[in-house]
């Protein structure tokens, strides 16, 4: 199975900050990497698909980059509603896998 | 677009349960569909996918115990869970596995809680 490793596991930041979350795959996954946001008690929400394409309706302060094995999710100018847990997920393999998550907390 | 799961509940170890997922706004037969679960306080774990052509795949943790299927007449996705273990306790989400978007999970249900306990 392809292992997905996110870093950091948790992150404290302030409203207005720029933050970056990284995701590394144990083997190349081309661009088959997606990012989700999950708030407590809610279903995950798709933010970015195919490494860098913003899902419809998602604010432009979210962006994704990378290909192969190394990927990043960047949030510019954090808003109060952005404090949540973020997951990466690969779909290169028939056996999809998620990263362990990054919890973004208010400093 | 909306997905509604049902069938969750409390079951004893070794027991069985079947989850259902009924989407509105699209057809299960024409899409890839996945199940994802989340144990209490833990991260997301992909469980299974069924392709539009009918091929199915499973995470190693559930292979041989869980079966994903669909009923086109009811436009419903299922997850049959047998030989349940305490560690299968989780919220189970169904999601559309969007082939044309790089196979991302673009629509999710609200989740169904499965508790395996004696």
Image (cartoon, coloured by chain):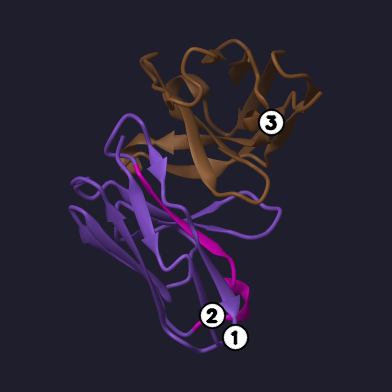
Label 2 secondary element: strand
- Name the image quarter holding residue B49: top left
Q: Is residue B108 above or below residue B80?
A: below
* Chain of the residue under label 3: B
Circle 2 is placed at which residue position?
A12
Q: Position of residue A57 (x, y in %)?
A: 50, 62
- Name the image quarter holding residue B77: top right
Q: Which residues are magenta?
A: A78-90
Q: Position of residue B95 (x, y in %)?
A: 53, 36
Which numbered disc covers residue A107? 1
Q: Are marks 2 and 3 in contact (CB under 8 Å)?
A: no
Chain coloured purple? A
Label 3 secondary element: strand
User: Tag count in the figure?
Assistant: 3
The tint chain B carries is brown
Q: Is residue B35 above or below residue A24?
A: above
Q: Position of residue A73 (x, y in %)?
A: 37, 67
Q: Is residue B19 above or below residue B98?
A: above
Same subunit, labels 2 and 3: the answer reads no
Circle 3 is placed at which residue position?
B5
Q: Earlier in the sequence, mark 1 or mark 2?
A: 2
Q: Nearer the viewer, mark 2 or mark 3?
A: 2
Considering depth in this image, is B84 or A77 the residue closer to the camera? B84
Considering depth in this image, is B67 or B65 the residue closer to the camera? B65
Q: Distance from label 3 to label 1 (Cα)? A: 36 Å
Please tell me which residue is depicted at 19% across the width and 47% down the height of the picture: A30
């Amino acid at each position: 199975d392809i292992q997905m490793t996110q870093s950091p596991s948790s992150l404290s930041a302030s409203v207005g900050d720029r933050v970056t979350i990284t995701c590394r795959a144990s083997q190349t996954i081309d661009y088959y990497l997606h990012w989700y946001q999950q708030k407590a008690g809610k279903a995950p929400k798709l933010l970015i698909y195919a490494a860098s394409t913003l899902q419809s309706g998602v604010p432009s302060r979210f962006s994704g980059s990378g290909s192969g094995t190394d990927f990043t999710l960047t949030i510019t100018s954090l808003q109060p509603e952005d404090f949540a847990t973020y997951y990466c997920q690969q779909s290169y393999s028939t056996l999809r896998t998620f990263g362990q998550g990054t919890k973004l907390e208010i400093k | 677009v909306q997905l509604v799961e049902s069938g969750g509940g409390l079951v004893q170890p070794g027991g069985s349960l079947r989850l259902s997922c009924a989407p509105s706004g699209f057809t299960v037969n024409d899409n890839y569909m996945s199940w994802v679960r989340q144990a209490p306080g833990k991260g997301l774990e992909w469980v299974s996918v069924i392709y539009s052509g009918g091929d199915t795949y499973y995470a190693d943790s559930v292979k041989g115990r869980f079966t994903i299927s669909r009923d086109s007449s009811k436009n419903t996705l299922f997850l049959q869970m047998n030989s349940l273990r305490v560690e299968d306790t989780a919220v189970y989400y169904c999601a559309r596995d969007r082939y044309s978007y790089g196979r991302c999970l673009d629509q999710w249900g609200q989740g169904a809680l499965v508790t395996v306990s004696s």
